[in-house]
Image: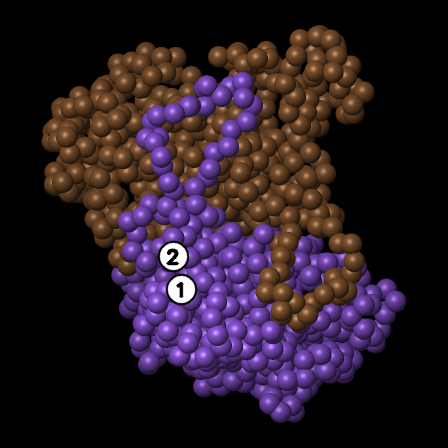
Chain colours: A brown, B purple
Amino acid sequence: MAGAYPYTVYRGTFIHLPKLSSSSAKPELVRNQGVLWVSSEDGRIKGHDWNVKDDASFKSFLSSHGWTDGHGRGTKVKVVESNDARNEFFFPGFIDSHIHAPQFPNLGLFGSSGLLGWLDEYTFPEEASFGSKSDPKNQDIDPKKTPAQGLRVYDQVITRTLAHGTTCASYFATIHVPATNALAALAYKHGQRAFIGRVCMDNKEQCPDYYVDQSADEGLNATIRTIDYIQKLDPNGTLVNPIVTPRFAPSCSNHSLSSLGELAAKYNPPLHIQTHISENLDEVELVHQLFPDSSSYAEVYDKHHLLTNRTILAHGVHLTHDERTLIRERGSKVAHCPASNSALGSGLAPVRAMLEDGLTVGLGTDVSGGYSPSILEVARQASLVSRMLSFSSEYQQMNGDLGNTTTNGHEKLSVPEILYLATRGGAGVVDMADDIGGFDKGMIWDAQLIELGAVKNYTQSPLDGEGVNSLATRDQRNVKAGTVGGVDLFGDETWEEQIEKWMWGGDDRNVKNVWVQGKLVHTRD
Amino acid sequence: MAGAYPYTVYRGTFIHLPKLSSSSAKPELVRNQGVLWVSSEDGRIKGHDWNVKDDASFKSFLSSHGWTDGHGRGTKVKVVESNDARNEFFFPGFIDSHIHAPQFPNLGLFGSSGLLGWLDEYTFPEEASFGSKSDPKNQDIDPKKTPAQGLRVYDQVITRTLAHGTTCASYFATIHVPATNALAALAYKHGQRAFIGRVCMDNKEQCPDYYVDQSADEGLNATIRTIDYIQKLDPNGTLVNPIVTPRFAPSCSNHSLSSLGELAAKYNPPLHIQTHISENLDEVELVHQLFPDSSSYAEVYDKHHLLTNRTILAHGVHLTHDERTLIRERGSKVAHCPASNSALGSGLAPVRAMLEDGLTVGLGTDVSGGYSPSILEVARQASLVSRMLSFSSEYQQMNGDLGNTTTNGHEKLSVPEILYLATRGGAGVVDMADDIGGFDKGMIWDAQLIELGAVKNYTQSPLDGEGVNSLATRDQRNVKAGTVGGVDLFGDETWEEQIEKWMWGGDDRNVKNVWVQGKLVHTRD
């Protein structure tokens, strides 16, 4: 729906990562200053002008389009400015390519045991709580049948991720139809771009008896009911889309995997698919035992036609080169979830090797294996993991354990590379590389306004003035912690260094506004 | 100095980690509810009463001491309460046992190269900028000779660490006497407990020519001038103390190392000492080359009498079992800096092995090898590193690389273990185990009031009410991101789970107040 004005003109500083011209090119940050305008009708970027540098040229720009910001004649447009004095800039929205919405209340709760204990103690009971007592057979479709606490959790996970600048998320829900539909309805209501998947898990040997599809067919039918609901909610799939979601190979029967592969292919266009792959070594071993006819984990999915060019594979920590080659050939994508992989001790995913094998890679929070709903936090962990991987290789080479593994920091991902994964990479993973993740003309305005804050202003020497000792009777003391969020600027940083500081120190306090499809969906408190 | 009241009575919820009864005991979180009182005269805890549960018993408690909160007769005391409805609790202040104050502006700036490139490109130039042009020979002692930007940096690092709940920090300054003294003066002024060390580095082969002590003796004399200044500033060493700081073995001549060991021993009580050890493999190799007469890195320090029971050794990632044994025998302590070790790819420090070898271990931010001034962030990284180490061991064992290394998550540090490192552990590292890090009677009130926030209140179903689509013309929308900081509570958490959520999701927004030596030194904006 159009607002009261046909266009919004964004004016100020724009930073993004241009699409790579070739697979061997390195991502680079680009900063432009000027104006960019977005149509209210479709939320897309209609043009930009980097020659608009001051008020005079802005005025000419407006009048050349027959526009006014309210102070002159012409069609009224909305103007949104970034403030240079506060070191503000527009940046593409983040894309969370793997997140379990119902696990949100368990952020930070890992218990004392390992992955299996964590699933049994925290994850499955939490997910099971999204079922409705009045709908034991999972026959309903009405979102309102979702338990009240479940609705609150879904409301909060969407609110929180938006507040962290996540404009698009690919969500795993639970096995429950009403709750899955509620997640879709709430994403739609909040204006977040989302892929919503009812989780399919019918292998009773591998799933708890209180939380499992009663059969492959019952699961398939339940999935279809969520697809129908979501496609009715957003008929053009502008904002919210269904995604076929077998939990992972061990939790599904062969029959379930096959029918889900067929189901996705039946639609026009085919539906997206998401699942997990090669997250940890025990799991890989289990897959070999459960699927002895397949030579690899990736082949299990391939046999069931689940490796498509619309498939998101979460993790991929322990994929072999052959598996990566197969995945690239099928055009499937990888959601890298380093915060989760480190927290669960799953391993260090070799992102450099994935990229060199030609894979499309994005970032995922993997709430609540990951402990944070912030893609910026995941970006930090992606860097740390790549740096530790670099160390590991060097260390093992020094000790003669590895042959010709590349070393010398080769695995290290740079800040621009990681921010590319968080934006363009994620856009590729959700199969929207031409639409989101950057500020090219024609792309959708899914964006965030970042405020780093000003350099702290000192009116006197820090050595002068009252110390804490003279305040002993005043009881209270307001110490301004500095600039915005965790970022401290001292005024001598280049703009690229400011971005590095943001990546390493920023949080949701730095996210001033968030837009999806040209609509404002979040304003910082 | 006493305030207008002789005591402050803290009332509400107190959480800390009791001192371990034996070296094999496991740290546990303990929660008490009631009152605890602190003398204004010396800032120490004079007693607590966990039977005070309600207003009536609080009234009786006050009158039994002859005190009043202003509503009755008696000596007026100050009352500070934690608010249960906001899930507030008092917690011991954090201790940052290793931080480079002058590197604060470089947080998040790592450049594209490795450790050496980082030192040359960022660290040494930044540290060198703390020198005064009017004092090229480093003869001055006056803090005011410090360049204005240096004062701002030191002011900000103290402000920021206090805001993150760091009540005590062991700082590396630079080689400059005025700037080192300024750091001490500012810590004293802000009321932060601090150890302040002028960095000694006289090995011209290993240090940049623009940033090096001109000789061992010149360095020694400069160090003495900072010790004199600091001991005059705070004659009883109540808050701020000097600490002898050879940067690390490779940056110092044998003569310098020896004379610094002698210097520390000469004082009564002997001075504290801090340095780096076994941070990365190249460095270890360099030490072997530079000190061929010593059989290990630890032995280099031991030979120069720098391994004392008042010595803080930062990192220790690659220490051998024999070195750990020597360090334990000497009573020296280790500052574990996982955020830095991961960011610089230095390796995974085996904290479990350190603890099992009987070492005292605390946490350090290692700003700016570490990218955050927050000990809570370091706590998270300590957990992640211990989990990856656990994975590594299992992985290597699976692949036959390791013999009888313990596995099965043995290396994993629990949340209570890590919070113990952040408080009691750090207190031991700075040789104040009887004074700070916990809430025992007689200890100093170095504490923080943590606010996790309330459970988000929903007055209607999240499915009802206005969606973002109906707001298209309103331009602005306030989405309450939820509770305080990064912590989301849903109301069904145990108090131990609340602490886990805080450790994994908390930040400076959750730090409402900070006290050092019984004085309020920070209040959240």
Q: Amino acid at mark 1?
A: Gly
B455 relative position to B302: left or right: left
Circle 1 — which element? Answer: strand
Q: Residue at x 48, y 48 (%)?
A: B485
- Chain at tag 1: B
Q: Earlier in the sequence, mark 2 or mark 1?
A: 1
* Position in image of residue B254 (x %, y %): 67, 82
Q: Is residue B465 visible?
A: yes
User: Could you tell me how far apart the alpha carbons at marks 2 and 1 are, in whole angstroms?
Assistant: 7 Å
Task: Name the foreground residue: B369 vs A92.
Answer: A92
Q: Which mark is residue B104?
A: none
Q: Which mark is residue B12?
A: 1
- Against A228, residue A54 (above or below) is below
Q: Quadrant of residue A12?
A: top right
Residue, disc 2: B84
Q: Quadrant of residue B217?
A: bottom right
Q: Residue at x 88, y 67 (%)?
A: B134
Q: Residues within 10 Å of mark 1 (few under 14, many from 20)?
A: many
* Position in image of residue A188 (x %, y %): 39, 23
- Against B493, residue B273 (above or below) is below
- Chain at tag 2: B
Q: Amino acid at mark 2?
A: Asp
Q: Quadrant of residue A327?
A: top left
Task: Name the foreground residue: B47 vs A111.
Answer: B47
> Count of labels shown?
2
Image quadrant occupied by the N terminus of chain B: bottom right
Task: Name the foreground residue: A340 vs A458.
Answer: A458
Q: Are marks 2 and 1 in contact (CB under 8 Å)?
A: yes
Task: Name the foreground residue: A402 vs A232.
Answer: A232
Q: Is residue B258 visible?
A: no
* Position in image of residue B366 (x %, y %): 57, 63
